[in-house]
Amino acid sequence: MKISKNGFVVAELNQSSELYKSWPLSKLYQDDGAKKLTYEAEMRWFSKYDMQHIIIEKDYIKRYSEYCKKINLNTCILLFETPLMAPKIGILDDFEIEEILGYDCIGTVYYSYLQTEIYLFFDELTNKNIIVNKYGLFDEITSVQYFIELRRQALSNGVNLEDYWKEMPARISIVKSF
């Protein structure tokens, strides 16, 4: 399966049981700066296109990250690479990956099937020697593909799982600040 560099997400890492919390300013309803940045993303990208809340515009990512730092939110810039062909980073490849965290199985950048459901498939995964890394992600895309197979089989067998979004493999990396 071929993946493409789709864009960036600003996130807080290690939030409770989740590895990352995407776009943390969106929950700061009383902060005018947070509201302004969230509104801009909604109007320019999120509500305008059918997309995964992934942004390619580095200027916006930089402004968002700097505002998070200003209000003492510990965030990082994540690169999402998925099978989606758009949005896609083309001429904006002038960034450096600091660390590859691994492969997730997402419904959206706000919801990880892997993080919330891995316990259901633990035995089947470990029988194939598939384990998560220190970030709770897989090291190989083939592990995500197997997880998706197990998940779809469970759904077809009537297991009650979240089924709003299609499962998507996503390689997630931390990017050095722009």
Image: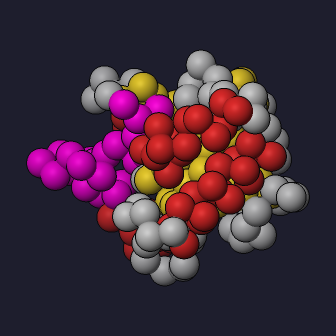
Task: Give whichever of 146, 101 is nearer the camera.
Answer: 146
Report the residue that reaches farthest toward the left: 30
Q: Is residue 177 visible?
A: no
Quadrant in which the C terminus appears? top right
Report the residue that reaches farthest toward the right: 2
- Give me the residue at 70% from left, 33% from top: 127
Above or below: residue 149 compared with residue 126? below
Residue 38 is left or right of residue 82, and the answer is left
- Give me the residue at 72% from left, 24% from top: 98
Q: Residue 134, position in %: x, y? A: 59, 19
Q: Residue 112, position in %: x, y? A: 49, 49
Quadrant in which the N terminus appears? bottom right
Q: Residue 74, position in %: x, y? A: 39, 24
Report the residue that reaches farthest toward the top: 134
Task: Give whichever of 163, 111 is nearer the camera.
Answer: 163
- Give me the residue at 54% from left, 78% from top: 50
Where on the picture, by quarter, is residue 68?
A: top left
Q: Residue 143, position in %: x, y? A: 74, 42
Q: Does the segment drawn in magenta span residue 23?
A: yes
Task: Give whichever of 157, 6 is nearer the camera.
Answer: 157
Q: How many marks?
A: 0
Q: Which residues are magenta?
A: 17-38
Q: Is residue 146 visible?
A: yes
Q: Does the segment drawn in magenta span residue 142?
A: no
Colour setup of the view: secondary structure
Above or below: residue 135 compared with residue 18? above
